[in-house]
Image (cartoon, rainbow, N blue to C red):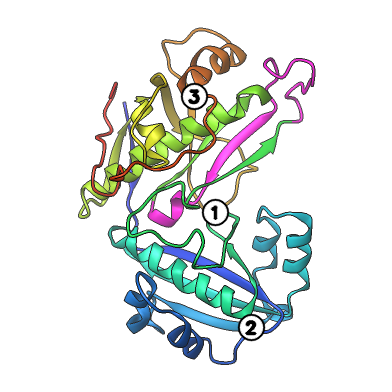
Amino acid sequence: MSITVPVPKTVMSRFVVAADEVPKDPYAMARAQVTGPPGEEVLDRLGTPLLRIRAVAAADSIWHGDLAAVAAADDERDRLGAAAGHLIIESETAPEARPRMAQAVRAVARALAETTGGLLADLCTAQLVPPDRRADGERDWFRVADGWLGIDCVINADGGMDADKPTECACLCLFTRGLSRFGLPELVIDRVACAYDLAATNVMRGLAVRLLGRLWADPDARELRLDESIVVEPEDMWGYWGARPLFGLPVPVRLADAGRSDLPSGVRHLELLPHPNFRGTRAEWGAEVLNEGLPSVAGWQPDTPPYRIDRQPVPLTEGG
């Protein structure tokens, strides 16, 4: 069995800078403040669908609901709500134009946030982006861990939360934010025990790397056919950080369209389920399968030279 994923003709990327004061002419500010690659590579596209910038009063902005979903500390959330103006940076491109186009557009958004002293929100990942181009700026190669994939969750009311038994509950429905920017479905793992949230997160990160590699391997593809039963390899999970695998075990899963109605609307979600060969409970699946993949690594420095998924795509086939 296979799952067909249509590749859209165009995809949208959107950032919002929330600031006390925004320029009347954001294009002039972009031209003045964006220097060097990759941002300067798109300055000649200002005003086209590839790079549009609008300045609006916060009271007139339609993005308050999206900003409310952005992960932020309390003081940052207060700043988002109190900002007088919004700069909306949008880019509509073909999926094959990414990831370099996405990096260039984000570099422009960073420059505008730094210049205005505002907070930069990525509405695709529902995360704040560090605005300072001198720290954590854009690389000259692509790494998913550089803020391109957000992980969110819904709490299952019937999940049996028990602080004394975090390995036995089914509290969490974890899902990604950000793959739709590249023309792919978002990913979901439901009924996850609290103790295995990082392990489940790393499996989704690994599958995201596999899907992106598959997408970029054939820029002319109009659809992807994915095996329903696949194995997420340690190479995939470490590839999220641009690193070659140091340890970890393969994680077999089955893919299916998610059936939950409380996930973000407007995008497709593929759920990672226990492989048909696994006969245990969800709690046992978390302990015996998810937790055997990459359960303890929350961050890692990339290899030198970097392991690049945008140039070394991994084939997505059953068992490997």
Callout 2 touching callout 1 (CB < 8 Å): no
Residue linked to disc 1: 125
Residue 16, position in %: x, y? 59, 70
Q: Count the labels in the image.
A: 3
| Kind of residue at disc 1 | Thr
Question: What's the residue at 34%, 41% (across, down)?
Answer: 303
Residue 56, position in %: x, y? 64, 83
Callout 3 touching callout 2 (CB < 8 Å): no
Res 53 visible: yes
In the picture, the quarter occupied by the C terminus is: top left
43 and 115: which is toward the camera: 115
Indicate yes or no whether the magenta region holds residue 170: yes
Residue linked to disc 2: 56
Residue 268, position in %: x, y? 48, 46
Separation (CA) of disc 2 from disc 1: 22 Å
Q: Which residues are magenta?
A: 157-183
Q: Which mark is residue 257?
A: none
| Kind of residue at disc 3 | Leu
| Kind of residue at disc 2 | Val
1 and 254: which is toward the camera: 254
Indicate yes or no whether the magenta region holds residue 252: no
Mark 3 vs mark 2, foreground winner is: 2
Question: What's the residue at 75%, 15% (across, down)?
Answer: 165
Q: Is residue 52 above or below residue 159?
A: below
Q: Quadrant of residue 219?
A: bottom left
Residue linked to disc 3: 273
Q: Quadrant of residue 305?
A: top left
Q: Earlier in the sequence, mark 3 or mark 2?
A: 2
Q: Is residue 91 above or below residue 243?
A: below
Query: Which element carries disc 3, helix, strand or loop?
Result: strand
